[in-house]
Amino acid sequence: MDKPLIRNFSIIAHIDHGKSTLADRILQFTGAISEREFHDQLLDDMDLERERGITIKASAVRINFKSKDGNTYELNLIDTPGHVDFTYEVSKSIGACEGALLVVDAAQGVEAQTVANLYLAMEHNLIIIPVINKIDLANAQIDRVRHEISDILGLDKENILLASAKQGIGTQEILEAVVERIPPPKGERTNPLQALIFDSKFDTYKGVIILVRLMNGVIRKKMKIMAMANNQVYEVLEVGVFNPREHQVDELSCGEVGYIACNMRDSKEVSVGDTITDAENPALQPLPGYKKVHPMVFSGFYPANSADFSVLKEAIDKLRLSDASFVFEPEKSASLGMGFRCGFLGLLHMEIVEERLEREYDLNLVVTTPSVIYRIMKKNGEIVEVDNPMKLPTAGDVDEVEEPYVRAYIITPKESIGNILELSESRRGSYVSTDYLDENRAQITYDIPLSEIIVDFYDRIKSVTKGYGSLDYELLDYRPTTIVKLDILINGEVYDAFSSIVFKDKAYAKGKAIIEKLKDTIPRHLFQIILQASIGGQVIARETIKSVGKNVTAKCYGGDITRKRKLWEKQKAGKKRMKQFGKIDIPQEAFFAALKA
């Protein structure tokens, strides 16, 4: 395809504003998919995405569109996630495009992630096409949303398109705007090959499949290519595009988006953001790539059956290919054996990775309490970063502790402002400002410790605002704090899977909440189970799970009482021995209950 007839664009929006539905309509309208093959959320190819109704992975697809000017254009569309935890997927997609459709719900209006995604696109100098979606809704407020897009986002009212992705209204106008407003890609076919790796995945038969956007040059079958990060040379075995199924082509040219397979078997050999070039005529320098991602939440992943450790290792390696924001390293736990310390961008990201490992690789996992990175200044002048309670230095060695803070932007209806202020204050937030977006909505800004928002803060915002609140946040800095290591003891032994680092003033409430949850979820055994929460060896809370009773004298009828006493003593000795050597069965629900406590 001639370069002037190519357009590369992505769809960005807040969660649940209709990105995936709009992508579906575009595919149907252009005939890329037949009615027989069509189903909702077509580009969301994971069962998990369709069940939850969210996009987790960005998806690239090539479509052909015949414009009213008589030309047939090649459109490379990348559908992106909307949740704050998957911002890295959005940034990767934006780096491979020249323009973006910014979709805004006609009923919900501009929300926190709408603003965040717009700024992300503007950083890459993308052409923005604003689209008001769901105009067919009974409660659509088109004029209000149009004013919000103009006033809050600073986009021209005249350029705003109206659409209903569900009804198919406005699809032709959106595609015409893509052709007219978004420029064709730059670069030259005759230049040395420069291809940006913006994603990858693993195929059982083909090995690692690399998704690329060609900035310069051309790539063909049998060609020798080189990854510029590690200077490894490969032979291209297959070149293709997604439309939306895999479709082999002879070559990919400058400006196009597609995939290559080169019999790469080791997931560590490919890195997102790397540049692929011609091994025989290499480019002088690599492309800028992407910013290094910094995980915010850390948790331990352990196989429930220790024999599955090698399976978990292989599964994590393969999953890392399709999720470059996920990081991990091996670690050992006294109570759980070998596992991995994993880093995530947020709690939803952690839940999704866990579910994918369990579903796609048939694993049964134990997940430890999530934690953030604390910066600890020791008395000997050494500075260490700690994300695992087991690595926390003793109190006598610590001079000062700092924890990460985020700047949280909460958009809420006017009547819920009081509830949001109360919630933010309870999470140790520092008030920054309140900005009224219009007569009905306000943006409240708080500086809040990251540890206070990773578990259920977003859920609580949705609850107190009746579903209308939204949250976006960015890492701010590190500030002094007072923390302690909270241990959970089961029958006198520390169970490090439940250990956590907590703010000192909240340690008692947290410890009490965890052991109460454990009491409700751990089943009764034939022996008594004592649950304790302790700080530095001092027990601060205790609960007891009573043993299951068994009437050992039921078979006795009449006779001397000494026979019954013998049976009771034997039972008592058995329970004492069982308490000493018996294995406590802790179900998976107990770990989740402790996580949410």
Image: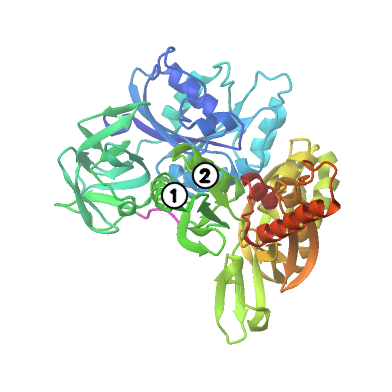
Residue 291 located within the stretch drawn in magenta: yes
In the displayed structure, does residue 409 sit left or right of residue 71?
Answer: right
Residue 430 visible, this orientation:
no
Residue at which label 1 appears: 308
Image height of 3 relative to 398, above or below = above
- Secondary element at tag 1: helix
Display colour scheme = rainbow
Residue 14 located within the stretch drawn in magenta: no
| Residue 342 location (% of width, % of height) | 51, 56
Q: Quadrant of residue 4?
A: top left
**Circles 2 and 1 in contact, beta carbons < 8 Å:** yes
The residue drawn where x is 29% and y is 46% is: 195
| Residue 164 location (% of width, % of height) | 59, 20
Residue at which label 2 appears: 364
Q: Quadrant of residue 215?
A: top left
| Magenta-highlighted residues | 288-292
Q: Quadrant of residue 33?
A: top left
Image height of 165 relative to 261, above or below = above
In the foreground, 145 or 553: 553
In the foreground, 362 or 452: 362
| Residue 363 location (% of width, % of height) | 48, 43
The residue drawn where x is 53% and y is 47% is: 365
| Residue 367 location (% of width, % of height) | 58, 52
Label 2 to label 1: alpha-carbon separation? 9 Å
